[in-house]
Image (cartoon, grey):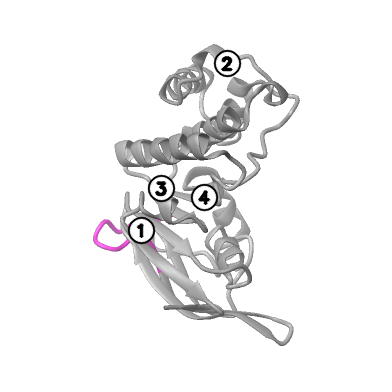
Amino acid sequence: MVTNDQNRPLLEVAGVSKTYGKQTVLKNVSFTMQPGERVALMGPSGSGKSTLLNLLSGIDHPDNGQILLASNDLARASASTLTHIRRHHISTIFQFFHLLPTLTASENIELTLQIAGVAAQERKNRVNELLEAVELTSHANAHPDTLSGGESQRIAIARALAHRPKLILADEPTGSLDSKSGQKTLDLLKNLTEKHQIALFLVTHSPEAAATCDRTLNLHDGTLI
């Protein structure tokens, strides 16, 4: 059962450590996020950013510590609870979009809603609303190979927002875009997460991207500094 205590942070990471073989990748990492808060994570390559993302999404589990999302311990949740959390409460935006090439833009957005069990008319309404929000209504029937990088990332953002998650994990979302498309993507993420009160955890190397968030965490050799 997924629970939520409104008096607690949305996300609580407490004393999290992770080791692969003899290499300690994360060391006693702790922080919290409030509902609707935007937090950037910066750090050099190899500092543990990707590992932390995998832990926050429930793909991997910490060796020590707790990760609580809406009061649910991801490391100790059952498989069915984890599936429910991923379908309803977490979304991920990737650097390289990960749109399904055989589906149109609108179908890529709708797929998330189908998996979540949203009724057909509501799916249609949300897809149309999101296409308008990302200014791509005219591209509803376009396939990914006909979209620019910036357009593809905007569709990916619409897909991430479709099921109205509590938390979006964004992994270098502007890393493969030119500066103009990247800035438009950042503005869109900021405006839409603010409008819908969705928390955003943004992994980035870009100070400009980090500046769109409420605060920045810095990870160095697996330790928050």
Give how far across and how far down residue 102 sits, in percent.
Answer: 75, 25
Mark 3 to mark 4: distance in Å?
13 Å
Q: Earlier in the sequence, mark 1 or mark 2?
A: 1
Q: Amino acid at mark 2?
A: His
Can residue 1 be seen? Answer: no
Q: Residue furthest left?
A: 7
Name the residue beneath numbered marker 2: 139
Name the residue beneath numbered marker 4: 170
Q: Residue furthest bottom?
A: 22
Q: Amino acid at mark 1?
A: Leu
Q: Foreground residue, 72 or 101?
A: 101
Q: Residue at x 31, y 62 (%)?
A: 9
Q: Foreground residue, 10 or 151?
A: 151
Name the residue beneath numbered marker 1: 10
Mark 4 to mark 2: distance in Å?
23 Å
Name the residue beneath numbered marker 3: 166
Q: Secondary structure at mark 4?
A: strand
Q: Earlier in the sequence, mark 3 or mark 1?
A: 1
Q: Earlier in the sequence, mark 4 or mark 2?
A: 2
Mark 3 to mark 1: distance in Å?
8 Å
Q: Are marks 2 and 3 in contact (CB under 8 Å)?
A: no
Q: Are marks 4 and 2 in contact (CB under 8 Å)?
A: no
Q: Amino acid at mark 4?
A: Ala
